[in-house]
Structure formats: C-alpha cells, structure tokens
Image (cartoon, rainbow, N blue to C red):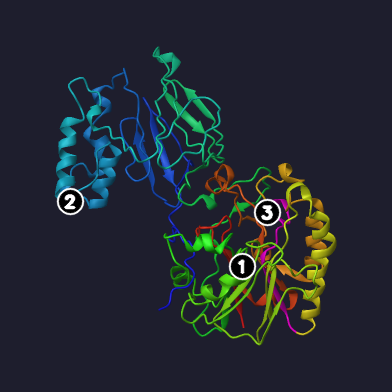
Amino acid sequence: MIQILKLGFHNLTFRSLFAVNYRSLKFKGPSSVKLELMGSKRPRSISSHSAVSDHLSIDASKSQKTVSKDNVRESELLGDDSKNIEDMTVQQLRSRLRHIGIPAKGTKQELVSALKNSLNSQIDGEGSLDQSNQVTTKDEPNITKNNSKRKFRGLSTRKLVQITADDSETSGTKKSKRTVKQSPANTVDVKILQNMKEQELTSIDAESYRVDLAVEEPWTIFAHKKPQKGWVAYNPKTMRSPPLAADTAHLKLMSWNVNGLRALLKLESFSTLQLAQRENFDVLCLQETKLQEKDVESIKQSLLEGYDNSFWTCSVSKLGYSGTAIISRMKPLSVRYGLGISDHDSEGRLVTVEFDNFYLLSSYVPNSGDGLRRLSYRISQWDPSLSNYMKDLERLKPVILTGDLNCAHQEIDIYNPAGNRRSAGFTDEERNSFQTNFLDKGFVDTFRKQHPDVVGYTYWGYRHGARKTNRGWRLDYFLVSESISDMVHDSYILPDVTGSDHSPIGLILKL
C-alpha cells in the first residue's frame, strides 16, 4: 500500500479522564477521608496512614497522638467478615487491605496472609497504628486537606501533592502546614468549606469540588475566562454520535489546517495511514499546505491507495504561503479553483468539488493579520464574495463549506474573549461579518447546532503551551446548507491529533 502524506498523528488512544469528585469527605480521629472516584460508585475510605492504590496517595504527618487499644479492634478492621477471612473474595480482601493501608496486590492466598498478619502488626504495644504500612506512590498525586476556606489548584497526575492532617487546637497539638507541589499547566479552582469540631470534621460542602487531573487529555479541561452556566468541555470520547448502521449510506468528511504540509511530512511520529484507518474518511480537505506548484506532483505520488483524486491550489503571489487541497476516494463531477475573482485568487485559498448531492468547498479564509491590517479586505471584500459564490452554487445543489474560517464566532468559541476583542479572528467586525454573510444566509454551523453549550477548540497557539492548558479558539468549521443540516449525523473535533496548531474536524453526512 502506497503511503499518503506522513501527517503527524500522536496519542491516538483516548485515555481516561482522571478526576476526583469530592462528594463525601469525612475526617474522624487524626484524619479520615472518604473519597469517591468520578465514574465509580464505590466509595473508598482512607485513614491518614493509608493510600488509594489506583489514583491517589495520601501522606499523613506522623501523629504524636495515640489511639486507645479499645478503638482499634479486629472487628473494626475486618467488619462482619473478620471470622471468615478464608471465605472472603479477592475483591473483599483487597478492599479490606486498602482500608487499613496495606498494598493489595498478589494472589488470593497472599492477600489472606497479608490480612491475617496485619491484625498482629497493625496494633503495637501502645495501641497505636503501625506506620510501617503507610504507602506513597511517587507517580500518583496526593491531596491536601486544610480546615480553612481556600482555593485548590488542579494537580498534574505526575506531581505529588502532600497533605498533612490537621489536629484540633483543642487537643493542644500543633497544626501541621499544608504544602502543595503544583503543576502550573493545569489549574482548576476548588471551593473548600471545612468545619472542625474537636477532632472531627463534621461537614464539607463538596458540591463545587472539582479537581480535574486531565493531563493526558488536556482538551477535556474546562478552560474559559468567562464561563456561563451549563457550559461543559468537549470530550469526543463521550460526545461523538454513535456509529451508523452498516447499511446506512453516508459519507465521512474531514478537514485539517496542517500549518505547512512539508514540515508535517518530516514528522516520524505517525502517518496518515493510521489516521485513515482509524477514521476511515472518504474525503480529506487541507488548508495552509504552504506548498508551491512544483511540489504538488510529488505529493500526489505519495497518496494512500484508494485516494486517487486530489486537487491542489497554491499561492502564486507569495510562495510557500496559504494553499488548500481536497483528497477524495470519489471522483468528483467537476472541480473549481478560487472564487473566479482575480483579486482573491492569487493566494490559493479555495478549492471546490462537485459531487452528486452537494458541493464541497475547502477554504482558508484570510487572517486579518497583525495590527488588523487586512481587516477591511476581509470583511468588505473576501467574506461577501465567498458568501455570494456559495449562494450561487446553492441554486444548483446544497453547499458544504469547511476549513479554517479564521473567526471565533461567539464567546464560547474562545478561551479569553475579553482579552481578544481587538485580536484578528475575534473582532466585532469579523464576528458580525461571519453572522451576516454565512449564518444569516442560511448556512448552519454544524458543531454548534449539535453542541450548543460545549466549549470545544480547534486551534491552540504554540506560545505559552496553550494546548496543554486548553486555552484555544474554535476557528475551523463545517457550514452546510440548511436543506441538508438534518442529514448531518455527527460534527466533531479530533483534539488528540497533533502535528499542527490546529486539530482536524469531521462531519458524517447521511445520504
């Protein structure tokens, strides 16, 4: 099989979101925490001398207090199963071992042995818990508790956050200090309300607790400087539409601003073969290829088998700039390059192909540029010309426009709306032009129609590591004629595909 463009493709597997939901937290005695892992209905109890083996580890400071022997009994350690250790299931054994802070790995017999031995080793001659069973996992984060209202920063899954348990002032012991080793890349505010009475934390209002540890899936971090009620972060793992039945006729279209195809070809981390195998797209639209006409033929020779139809347009006014393309399994009925207006067609910004049921346009809309030097050209010439061209085509067939349209239309489409009011791509003029020339003329923003309250970005600037903190923009779209908007089965983003400062977007259209 002939290799297609070696397009960078990294981290194809969607890893699970690691988040902690503090629905119920209680501290008794020196410190006792009851945590619920998000996505799991099973609560896990942790004493200050134990650890959560799956995702969390808690380091408690050495207590100077002692617990009377009457308070630590076998029945408290094993509950109703204390007389039938041999009859306990592996799950029960592991649960009990974790409860008392013993590593819960090994065969059933090893677990039974460890549980029996713990009855003798955990209670010393003074009746205090043996601290030798305390476990710390260096690759997992820990959690801090404090008896004051404060903000809690989001933690990296590979950073440790040490917590030391607070003792009551009435006990006469010193309060331990909270130290947090934070990950600057992922910060989430957490509201904490703790009411201490004697040695017992009686209540915590945890409804607003959210420690989001989505380091491996940064796009699932809810990042927005002006969030509105009901908005949620985009997660393709849970928000993609279910697959269509095998006998349902449909097409899968993809679009990607590759930010320089030749640079992407040099990446060794992946190939488009992997992307094609996973997504099985029928048509791939590209923007900002930055190719010259002399490069096109060699690129065509490297296409995947089955994608025999490709159409490229390059900038001739400025070499190595802009450029768009459409690569297809299906042979189109016709192909057009540009808008048919010389003032707009020297930068290789538009390719149109005609299929049986619709026209497909791959477009790279001009950026207004530094100092908004091209803003006037963009809103007074390009946008109206493209809109009129689409409406002319629509007289014959429905139209699908895709690509980097260089506009974050609404505040939900950009991380920092207030700070970018005069930035190219989010000026009032560009947003109004987008509304007037496209949406008001009957073209539907398919992603926003499907996900009205979802914060999903398609572009992250390279500066300041914006992708790691999900501080992005939604600049890439599939706009479709209203007449076929109900045929859209899924409009989605592939934020895990790297190699460019944009992510690919997709559209599944029922036929």
> Is there CB contact under 8 Å for labels 3 and 2?
no
Task: Please say whether residue 468 is one of the residues in the magenta stretch.
Answer: no
**Which mark is first along the chain, 3 or 1?**
1
Q: Is residue 441 visible?
A: no
- Going 82% across and 54% down the picture, which residue do you hit? 429
Please name which of the two marks, 1 or 2, marks the residue nearer to the observer.
1
Residue 123, given in percent of the width and then of the height, sits at: 20, 27
- Going 21% across and 30% down the picture, which residue do you hit? 122
- Compared with residue 122, is residue 290 higher up or lower down, i.e. above or below? below
Q: As shown in the figure, which amino acid type bears the numbered disc 1?
A: Gln
The residue indicated by pointer 2 is 108
Q: Which mark is residue 357?
A: none
- Going 54% across and 32% down the picture, which residue do you hit? 192
Residue nearer the viewer, 484 or 84: 484
**Which mark is first along the chain, 2 or 1?**
2
Please name which of the two marks, 3 or 2, marks the residue nearer to the observer.
3
Mark 2 falls on what kind of element? Answer: helix
Q: What segment is highlighted magenta in the picture? A: 397-412
Please name which of the two marks, 1 or 3, marks the residue nearer to the observer.
1
Q: Which mark is residue 413?
A: 3
Query: Left of 242 or right of it: where is 479?
Result: right
Q: As shown in the figure, which amino acid type bears the numbered disc 3?
A: Asp
